[in-house]
């Protein structure tokens, strides 16, 4: 018996401040039928962030309890905090035929690929480190100390970009969002063809 077609699992990574959230929001305005995986995190919310919308903000104690219960598809310690993706969110979306996008770090992305090899890994790169620092400073969400940690980690994350299926350079947001949209829609189209999608063919 043929089941309902499964959705695509997209993973979006890249250094903090590179523009992942910006591109994802533009994509979601354009492309229906894709949902955002709301991660759990132990970091505190920023002024414009809402619990249950941007993240599930939880204590370290709750994070550990969920980890012990095997609730996370992947998790990592990033820039001094714990972050994790709930397996149930991902399974629910895919089983009901909806696409889901995870916005997670490189460590998490590689865990997802190991667990679900059919996942599509997309890396968002800044045009330069100078521009990355400029964007992070301009966003105004980090203390100087946290900014230093994020910029240091950015170099380590950039070294892993070759492990991704696609690398998008976020020079201009509208152009980069076009590229992201094309990638997502191409996988959807390819799914409809016999043999399905492979990133080599896109
Ligand atoms: P991330 O989600 O990767 O941490 P954000 O989406 O929060 O990054 O973007 C970081 C900052 O850079 C934000 O202030 C955003 O408005 C800005 N930004 C994003 N993309 C661009 C771009 N292409 N050009 C200039 N600024 C950008
Ligand atoms: P921020 O604190 O700026 O929202 O996110 C910091 C970093 O943590 C970013 O690289 C972001 O992609 C990553 N991140 C967010 N959620 C998750 C998650 O559930 N798992 C992992 N591994 N990383 C995450």
Image (tube, helix red, strand yellow):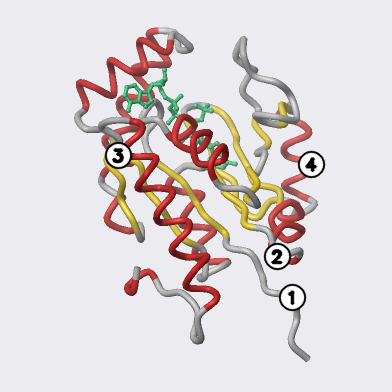
Instruction: Check residue 139 in the rendering and tell me which mark sits there, or answer none.
Output: none
Q: Crowdedness of circle 3 by 10 Å Cα count: few (<14), some, many (20+)?
A: many
Task: Identify the mark nearer the N-term, 2 or 1.
Answer: 1
- Which residue carries the number 2 mark? 97
* 3 or 2: mark nearer the eye: 2
Left or right of 68? Residue 74 is left
Between 168 and 110, the residue placed more toward the observer is: 168
Q: Are marks 1 and 4 in contact (CB under 8 Å)?
A: no
Task: Identify the mark nearer the N-term, 1 or 3.
Answer: 1
- Which residue carries the number 1 mark? 4
Element on which disc 4 rests: helix
Task: Identify the mark nearer the N-term, 2 or 4.
Answer: 4
Q: Are marks 1 and 3 in contact (CB under 8 Å)?
A: no
- Which residue carries the number 4 mark? 65
Q: Position of residue 134 (x, y in %)?
A: 28, 15
Q: Are marks 2 and 1 in contact (CB under 8 Å)?
A: yes
Q: CA distance from mark 4 to mark 3?
A: 34 Å
Task: Identify the mark nearer the N-term, 1 or 4.
Answer: 1
* 1 or 4: mark nearer the eye: 1
Element on which disc 2 rests: loop
Q: CA distance from mark 2 to mark 1?
A: 7 Å
- Residue at figure coordinates x 42%, y 47% from the top left: 106
Q: Crowdedness of circle 1 by 10 Å Cα count: few (<14), some, many (20+)?
A: few
Q: Quadrant of the C terminus?
A: bottom left
- Which residue carries the number 3 mark? 125
On screen, residue 194 above or below 24: below
Is the C-beta of the residue carrying label 4 under 8 Å from the nearest atom of ligand 2? no
Task: Identify the mark nearer the N-term, 3 or 2.
Answer: 2
- Residue at figure coordinates x 74%, y 75% from the top left: 4
* 4 or 3: mark nearer the eye: 3
On screen, residue 155 above or below 179: above
């Amino acid at each position: 018996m043929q089941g309902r077609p499964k959705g695509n699992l997209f993973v979006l990574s890249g250094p903090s401040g590179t523009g992942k959230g910006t591109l994802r929001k533009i994509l979601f305005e354009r492309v229906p039928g894709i949902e955002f995986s709301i991660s759990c995190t132990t970091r505190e919310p920023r002024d414009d962030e809402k619990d249950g919308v941007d993240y599930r903000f939880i204590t370290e104690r709750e994070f550990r309890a969920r980890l012990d219960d095997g609730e996370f598809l992947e998790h990592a310690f990033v820039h001094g905090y714990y972050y994790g993706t709930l397996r149930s969110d991902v399974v629910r979306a895919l089983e009901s035929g909806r696409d889901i996008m995870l916005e997670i770090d490189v460590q998490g992305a590689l865990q997802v690929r190991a667990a679900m090899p059919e996942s599509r890994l997309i890396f968002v790169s800044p045009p330069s480190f100078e521009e990355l620092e400029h964007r992070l400073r301009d966003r105004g969400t980090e203390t100087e100390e946290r900014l230093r940690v994020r910029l240091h980690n950015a170099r380590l994350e950039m070294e892993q970009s070759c492990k991704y299926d696609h690398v998008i350079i976020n020079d201009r947001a509208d152009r980069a969002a076009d590229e992201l949209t094309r990638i997502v829609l191409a996988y959807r189209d390819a799914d409809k063809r016999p043999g399905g999608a492979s990133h080599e063919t896109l």
